[in-house]
Amino acid sequence: MDLLTLFLGVSLVLWSLRTAFILNRRHRSKSISGKNLPPGPVPLPIVGSLFKLGDKPNESLAELAKTYGPLMTIKLGGVTTIVASSAAIAKEVLQTHDQALAGRTVVDAVRALNHYQSSMVWLSASPRWRNLRKLCNHQIFTTQRLDASESLRRLKVWQLLAHVRESAQLGQAVDVGQAAFATTLNLLSNTVFSVDMARPGSETAQEMKAVVWGLMEEAGKPNLSDYFSVLKPFDLQGIRRRFKIYLRRLHKLFDDMIDQRLNSKASISSPTIRNEDLLDVLLVHFQENASEFGHSDMKSLLVDIFGAGTDTTSTTLEWAMAELLHNPESMAKIQLELRENFVEGKPVEEADVARLPYLQAVVKETLRLHPPVPLLIPHRAETDVEICGFSVPKHSQVLINAWAISRDPSIWTNPTSFVPERFLGSSEIDVRGRDFELIPFGAGRRICPGMLLALRMVHLMLASLLQSFNWKLEGGMCSKEMDMADKFGITLQKAQPLRAIPLQVQVSES
């Protein structure tokens, strides 16, 4: 039975590929003939250069760019893909031609439950997308709202420290990424729903992290359905099916939260009473715009907020701690800076970050070496565009390799080494989308709307963990033995979770 199933499956794939080849050849001859495409590897029949991607496309594309240049064409099955691998070309894509290249290539995974039709991440730059973006910029991630919620972030970090302190007393290792994820999850869940969703180290936190990473991993995997349209109905790799499973789990959670809030409002005498959290803001907004937005749109927005907000922040914190443990000299410098700037026992506040230049440099260097999204979410050309004398055809996919740009040896000295000192006295290099040498959050109209919250959380958590504890690796491992490998999804996670033993810093008696 297994052999028969395999035979039928292979036959189906071969037939589908043959059909795709014929259709793609006809389409290519019509749409690309005469266009002056950027250089790139010679594609194989049918599959193009798919086999060159490997399991880490960011690294494979960076290697190809060494041969074919910072603006490159690569055929991925039936999809013409333009790859930008330098700061100058990224600026052309994300600033000069931002409007023309602000479309989205929708990967097949996010077609599950029609998520792409409501997700701000995957919608094209349409009026619907602009309204959602305006909601985020004016209601959710404003400076005023972030300032108002500072005490909540302080409380969540205090709870993180309490969890780490328990481990220190027991001499147990902390899963750093897991603890950071639970902290960020609770911050967001309190901001949105006024409740904690998990306790650091709890099974709930582990389950939520697995769900969020599952979404990121499946959406980021090379998928035959994305490269051969004739294969979309079959979901041969099961990517859309698995994405749907993860998505349904989040939808169930959000449905329960929304229904509970609506029921509580219906049961009280004055339904205008509000919790003053984000869910109330969203309920009012979506009710006032009921002709444009529905219940599914609210759930998709919450998936975007929780997915991007928890994963990127906790991953960056984990990488920062890993690099500091891997580079003890840098660890000593940042802890010295904290000791020199704070009276013993005084916790770090967000306002203190401005006078901690080495802390800021460590975060920048972490984002340089380990950008949360190594290949920015794929753009799509809405019109024909010319960049540096080459044509970017309408409907082509456009990838910006942020990972390659932040390791470009023409920009960075010793680009693969962790050297926070490179950012000391270099305040002109920023991570907020103005300097294209370092774009971990993207740039232009598609820049990550939650960037400011993520930066506040990473700086505060990192400073607090290093001020309150010394750290050593589990099992007596020395720093140079650490496994610093990563694994690719939409985000770039540490392949081996960081486990480190906290040692309580002793406060001297005055």
Image: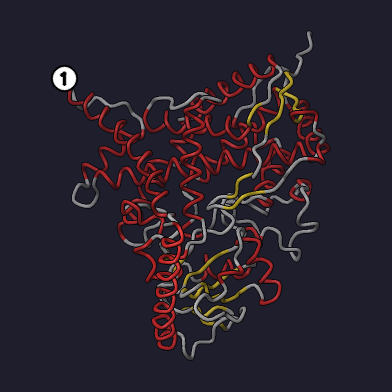
Residue plotted at (75% across, 27% down): 471
Q: Nearer the viewer, residue 72 or 437?
A: 72
User: Between residues 154 and 238, which one lies in front from this camera angle?
Assistant: 238
- Residue 102 appears anywhere in the view: no
Position above or below: 240 against 258: below
Residue occupied by mark 1: 269
Judged left or right of residue 296, residue 378 is right
Q: Is residue 284 left or right of residue 95?
A: left
Give the image location of residue 442, x and y in percent.
54, 56
Q: Give the percent coordinates (x, y) of residue 167.
A: 65, 19
Quadrant of the rendered image containing residue 276: top left
305, above or below 31, in the image? above
The residue sitting at 35% across, 42% down in the picture is 248
Query: Furthest-bottom residue in view?
Result: 34
Q: The residue under label 1 is which amino acid type?
A: Ser
Name the residue rendered at 56%, 64% in the picture: 400
Q: Report crowding for label 1: few under 14, some 14 to 19, many 20 or more residues within 10 A (C-alpha).
A: few
Q: Residue at x 46, y 65 (%)?
A: 224
Residue 285 makes an appearance in the image: yes
Q: Nearer the viewer, residue 491 or 305?
A: 491
Residue 197: x and y, percent? Answer: 43, 27
Determine the residue located farthest toward the top in the rendered image.
509
